[in-house]
Amino acid sequence: GAGVSQSPSNKVTEKGKDVELRCDPISGHTALYWYRQSLGQGLEFLIYFQGNSAPDKSGLPSDRFSAERTGGSVSTLTIQRTQQEDSAVYLCASSRLAGRGYNEQFFGPGTRLTVL
Amino acid sequence: AQKVTQAQTEISVVEKEDVTLDCVYETRDTTYYLFWYKQPPSGELVFLIRRNSFDEQNEISGRYSWNFQKSTSSFNFTITASQVVDSAVYFCALSEVQTGANNLFFGTGTRLTVIP
């Protein structure tokens, strides 16, 4: 059984450009999460998907950030007009059970984004 | 509001010493889950343990043990006879049930260095 995979592993972009980060969750996991890990902020929740329910976007830092999940599996996190403060490691996680709070999450290796 | 505090930013121990990593949390929920994750130098977060708020029984897994005390809102993690491979950043996290939050709230992490 493969774990959570993310691509690319590293992304360097210029300020103002758009980037897309991809996450493939563990097969059969219904919940998918995006987090951001940066030096100054630690690990921050960004967005959560559960089945066909509306995503919980409460952690997205600005409207430049968006995410979608197609077919209940693969997810893409898009950052438009990137800024230097967007530089961070973006982590994706998935979990099997959808129960509130019962979210033993399994993390991918992350995408390191550097905005020049 | 929920909060997880890991007061120890960095700890260094000599191999074979025991070490305890502290975690203190705040929540208004009466039902919640607590987690520990390990982040080795490779960067991928590895799930170690989940504990629900109704289960205060301590747990031991090999050289790892966890002490959950609701009275002091603490969920401490002890590594016995530490090894170099234990060197990593360790994160404590909280997930609430009643507020409906589906994400993990992480502490800022404790960097453990085991010196051979």
Image (cartoon, rainbow, N blue to C red):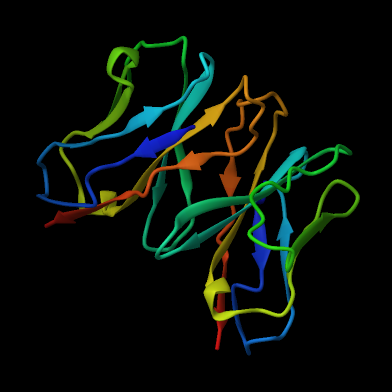
In-image side of A109 versus B92 (left or right)? right
Look at 48% across and 51% down and name the residue there: B45
Total marks drawn? 0
Residue B31 in the image: state x and y as whole percent: 54, 15
In this view, B44 is above or below B103: below
The one of B68 and B107 positioned closer to us in this rendering = B107
Give the position of the C terminus of chain A as an image quadrant.
bottom right
Give the quarter of the image for residue B93. Answer: top left
Residue B100 is drawn in which quadrant? top right
Residue at image position (57%, 72%) is: A86
Residue A13 in the image: above or below residue B10 = below
Which percent across, then down, holds residue B96?
A: 56, 26
Is residue B90 among the parts visible in the rendering?
Answer: yes
Residue at 22 percent across and 46 percent down: it is B8
Write the residue at 12% across / 49% down: B15
Residue B51: horizontal and vertical position, in percent? Answer: 45, 22
Q: Where residue A18 sits in the image (x, y, percent)?
A: 74, 80
Q: Is residue A3 visible?
A: no
Judge whether A9 appears above or below A107 on screen.
below
Q: Is residue A66 left or right of residue B76?
A: right
User: Is A32 positioned to the left or the right of A92 in the image?
Assistant: right
Q: Could you say which quadrant of the image residue B40 lies in? A: bottom left
